[in-house]
Image: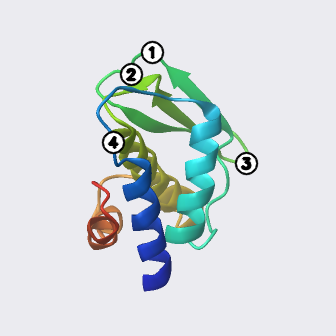
Amino acid sequence: MQKRKALKLRRKIKIATMNDRSPYVTTKRSINFWFKYINKQLFDDQLPPFDRIIIKKWLKKAIGQVCTYPDKNPKRFDLEMLKKYKTKKEFIDTLAHEMIHLYQMACRKDTGNHNKLFYSFKPKFKFIGLEL
């Protein structure tokens, strides 16, 4: 990731979340917009799109998740996000977090766990203003 791209992403997130005080309603359009933007700036367009995007009223023990289907050929990756988040910032943080899991599994053929590869994104996220 280039520093220029990171700064651009940081500015974009800061502007988008400037007056962030009310609950944020998730839409597929917003997921696609932020996915494309974060993929370009943070992952250099390496990520494939999610196979399906599912917006749910609640998730068990999560606020977002990537579901995989290892028995499918080719392997499928679905994104599940909540219908509402406390703020737009929490929505963007969650999507970016799930994008790391997609990167781990789709690009690096990793387990997708919170491991050394996952936490290697911590300094990048901190610089950009995202929470892991």
User: Which residue in the protein does label 1 denote?
Assistant: 57
Q: Amino acid at mark 1?
A: Lys
Q: Helix, strand, or loop for circle 4? A: loop
**In screen coordinates, is 80 left or right of 86?**
right
**C-alpha span from label 3 to label 1:** 29 Å
Number of other residues with Cα within 10 Å of mark 1, as a class: few under 14, some 14 to 19, many 20 or more? few
Work out which residue is located at the far right of the displayed protein and give it.
73
Query: How is colour applied across the structure in the image?
Result: rainbow
Q: Helix, strand, or loop for circle 3? A: loop
User: Which residue in the protein does label 2 denote?
Assistant: 59
User: Which circle, 1 or 4, is nearer the viewer?
Assistant: 4
Instruction: Please give the label number shown on residue 27.
Output: none
Number of other residues with Cα within 10 Å of mark 4, as a class: few under 14, some 14 to 19, many 20 or more? few
Q: Amino acid at mark 4?
A: Asn
Q: Amino acid at mark 3?
A: Pro
Q: Earlier in the sequence, mark 3 or mark 1?
A: 1
Indicate the position of residue 129 as horizontal and vertical percent values: 30, 62
Residue at the image point whose x is 58% and y is 27% from the top: 54
Q: In the figure, 2 relative to 117: above or below?
A: below
User: Which circle, 2 or 3, is nearer the viewer?
Assistant: 2
Residue at the image point whose x is 33% and y is 39% from the top: 20
**C-alpha span from label 3 to label 4:** 42 Å
Instruction: Please give the label number shown on residue 19.
Output: 4
Q: Helix, strand, or loop for circle 1? A: loop
Q: Earlier in the sequence, mark 2 or mark 3?
A: 2
User: Which circle, 3 or 4, is nearer the viewer?
Assistant: 4
Q: In the figure, 114 relative to 65: above or below?
A: below
Q: Amino acid at mark 2?
A: Leu
Instruction: Please give the label number shown on residue 74.
Output: 3
Indicate the position of residue 104 as horizontal and vertical percent values: 47, 61
